[in-house]
Structures are given as structure tokens and as C-alpha cells.
Image (cartoon, rainbow, N blue to C red):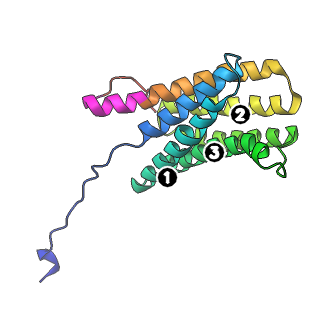
């Protein structure tokens, strides 16, 4: 059989877009935590459960699905922020269940937030090749981490409230972007605008 007799087969990717799951998991968990940050209710098991199962596990699953689609940005973002939620819950819960494990110091939590802020800013640079909605999600998340880092270091309650409102904008915009992905898939066209690159 000659090479010219071989017909190449092109496989079509029929898998769903995992960005909707990742954005909605991140956004809704972020909104709920930041409602606590602005004082609507205390940090409670509802937020921790969301952090483990939706913000955490669902985002990790979305990240793995993005890997399957060959999307390095989506894989890195969703898997990392899924692990962020899992580690945040661990930082809060582990010292309660294992007395030998001390909770983080203010300097430690501040460093944790600043490292996530640096990571997020680097991903924000990546969104400059994507769309306006994702740019807004990542720049507000960068600001949120910086404010939380300063709050952890200085203990200024006002900063936590300001961070809470920035977090609501960030989480709400992530949910909006996630819904835009879902509706575009359902209707076969853009329903909620996400802006050009």
C-alpha cells in the first residue's frame, strides 16, 4: 500500500467546554466567602463545604478536563484554584482536628495570600490574549489577594471589607463568564457578551 493510498482521519473533539464548570465553581464559592468577609454571616461549614466540593474538587475536575482538551491556561488555572480552595479549608480546619498542627501565623497567611496574588497576576497577563471578561476576573482576583495579604499582616478590618466587595465583583464576574459559556453552547451563539481581546 502506497502512502498516497492512506486517508488521514481527523478526530473531532465532541467533549464539553469545561470552562463553564470551572468558572461557576470558582465564582460561586468566591461570592459566598466574600459575603462573609463583608459581614453578612460568619465563616461557617457552608463555606468550607463549598470550598472542598465545588470550589475545590469541581475546579480540579475542570482542570483535568482542560488538560484533555490541550488547554494549558485552563488546566493551570482551574487545577490551581481548586487546590487553593482545598488548601484554604485545610489551613482553617487542620489545626482544629490535629492539635499538634499549629495554625498559620499572620505573617504566614499574609505570605500565602501574596504568593497567590503573584500567581494570579501572571495568569492575568495570559488573559490579555483572551477576552475582557476573563481579564476582569483575574485583575480583581489579583487585587483581592493583595488586599487579603495586607489585611492578614496588618489586621485592619476595613481592608477585609474592601476586599470582600472586590471579591464579590470577582466572583460575580466569574459566574457571569461561566454562564456566558453555558448559554453560548446551548444557543449556538453568544448570548452574554464577554468582550473582545
Give residue 81's quadrant in the image. top right
Count neighbours of disc 1 (C-alpha within 10 A) and say few if under 14, some if 14 to 19, many if 20 or more. Answer: few
Please state if 114 lies on the left or on the right of 190 as rendered.
right
Give residue 145's quadrant in the image. top right
Where in the figure is residue 39, as x and y percent of width and height?
71, 17
Where in the figure is residue 99, as x and y percent of width and height?
83, 48
Q: CA distance from mark 3 to mark 2?
A: 16 Å
- Disc on the earlier residue, 3 or 1: 1
Whether residue 180 appears in magenta in the rendering, the answer is yes
Q: Report the residue marked by disc 2.
A: 145
Q: Say what secondary structure mark 1 lies in.
A: helix
Q: CA distance from mark 3 to mark 1?
A: 21 Å
> Which disc, if any, is residue 90?
none
Can you say whether 101 is above or below 55 in the image?
A: below
The span shown in magenta is: 179-189
> Which disc, if any, is residue 72?
1
- Disc on the earlier residue, 1 or 2: 1
Q: Say what secondary structure mark 2 lies in.
A: helix
Q: Residue at x 58, y 25 (%)?
A: 31
Amino acid at each position: 500500500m502506497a502512502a498516497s493510498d492512506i486517508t488521514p482521519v481527523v478526530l473531532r473533539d465532541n467533549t464539553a467546554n469545561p470552562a463553564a464548570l470551572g468558572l461557576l465553581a470558582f465564582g460561586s464559592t468566591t461570592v459566598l466567602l466574600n459575603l462573609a468577609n463583608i459581614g453578612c454571616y460568619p465563616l461557617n461549614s457552608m463555606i468550607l463545604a463549598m470550598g472542598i466540593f465545588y470550589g475545590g474538587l469541581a475546579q480540579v475536575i475542570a482542570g483535568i478536563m482542560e488538560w484533555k482538551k490541550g488547554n494549558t491556561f485552563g488546566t493551570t488555572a482551574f487545577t490551581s484554584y481548586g487546590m487553593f480552595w482545598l488548601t484554604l479549608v485545610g489551613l482553617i480546619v487542620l489545626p482544629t482536628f490535629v492539635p499538634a498542627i499549629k495554625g498559620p501565623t499572620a505573617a504566614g497567611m499574609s505570605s500565602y495570600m501574596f504568593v497567590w496574588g503573584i500567581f494570579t497576576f501572571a495568569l492575568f497577563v495570559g488573559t490579555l490574549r483572551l477576552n475582557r471578561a476573563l481579564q476582569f476576573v483575574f485583575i480583581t482576583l489579583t487585587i483581592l489577594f493583595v488586599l487579603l495579604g495586607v489585611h492578614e499582616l496588618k489586621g485592619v478590618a476595613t481592608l477585609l471589607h474592601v476586599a470582600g466587595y472586590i471579591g464579590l465583583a470577582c466572583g460575580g464576574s466569574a459566574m457571569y463568564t461561566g454562564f456566558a459559556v453555558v448559554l453560548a453552547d446551548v444557543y449556538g451563539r453568544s448570548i452574554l457578551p464577554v468582550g473582545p481581546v
